[in-house]
Image: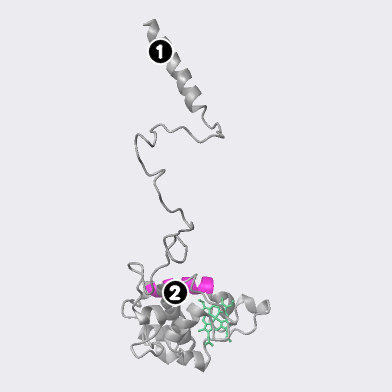
Amino acid sequence: MRYVYLVTAFVVVLTVSLLGFRGSKFTTPPMDVFPEWAFPGMAYQPKYRPQAASRFFADGRADRPLPPHVMARGELRADDHLYRGKDASGAWARDFPASLTVDLKFMQRGQERYTIYCAPCHGTLGDGNGIAKRYGMGATPSYHDERFRQMAEGEIFNTIAHGSPNKNMLPYADKLVPEDRWAVIAYVRALQRARAGSTADVTDASVRQTLGIE
Ligand code: HEC
């Protein structure tokens, strides 16, 4: 029985002296528990490390550039309407992509994104009176101008994705994925519609009465 204690103590001392204390640093390479010559593995096999040079390829690079027109799976983005705001003829699309449903949920998403990313300049009403105006951003136009009422959805999409033509407004492509851009456009349309509203839009008889509309 005494030998059990002795052997245990020996094993502990041996392990610690071979492997060291936890956290200790070594200046020599770590010991191979399974030496490479006995167990050939991947650690020492010939291979290219990232950004290494290569004598095999004519341009001397081990990292190979993608062949032209190669696309990651699921990244094709073939839908011109959804991803570029263009219709089949290549003009700015004048409606929403078929793959999106414009419903209340979509509109609420648009309102939320608009409030975060557009309202600081364009204002909560879309009239260009956002908080940024007080700090000198005077150039923001009103969505209620005739030009913006007539502007195609696709062109608004393009403005969000790439900024305004003279770059007074910078792109928001990194902050809004294509679906969110369309949601924002739906909300901009709602703001424009609301501004153009009149009492004739109230069709519910009881509401008309409450509001005192003849
Ligand atoms: C930092 C301020 C700022 C923010 C934020 C901003 N805009 Fe603008 N936007 C402008 C200014 C300034 C112009 C006028 C640009 C010009 O004259 O080129 C403009 C112009 C536009 C135009 C008209 C472009 C044209 O062709 O004349 C659209 C559409 C538009 N913004 C949509 C948006 C939407 C949607 C958002 C939110 C995703 C947004 N903007 C966020 C400042 C802003």
Residue named by callout 2: 110
Residue 209 drawn at (x, y percent) = 41, 86
Q: Quadrant of the C terminus?
A: bottom left
Say which element carries label 1: helix
Extreme residue toward the left, this view: 98
Q: Residue at x 45, y 53 (%)?
A: 49
Residue 19 drawn at (x, y percent) = 48, 27
Q: Residue at x 36, y 71 (%)?
A: 70
Q: Quadrant of the N terminus?
A: top left
**On screen, residue 89 above or below 97:** below
Residue named by callout 1: 7
**Left or right of residue 188: residue 75:** left
CA distance for labels 1 and 2: 72 Å
**On screen, residue 36 above or below 145:** above
Residue 8 drawn at (x, y percent) = 41, 15
Say which element carries label 2: helix
Q: Does residue 175 belong to the magenta stretch? A: no
Q: Residue at x 44, y 80 (%)?
A: 185
Of the pair 15 and 165, the residue shown nearer to us? 15
The residue mark sitting in front, 1 or 2, is 1
The amino acid type, in three-letter code, at marker 1 is Val
The amino acid type, in three-letter code, at marker 2 is Gly
User: Which corner quadrant of the figure contains ligand 1?
Assistant: bottom right
Characterize the magenta stretch by its predominant secondary structure: helix
* Region in magenta: 106-117
Question: For residue 81, which quarter of the picture?
Answer: bottom left
**Circle 1: is it few (<14), some (14-19), or many (20+) Cα within 10 Å?**
few
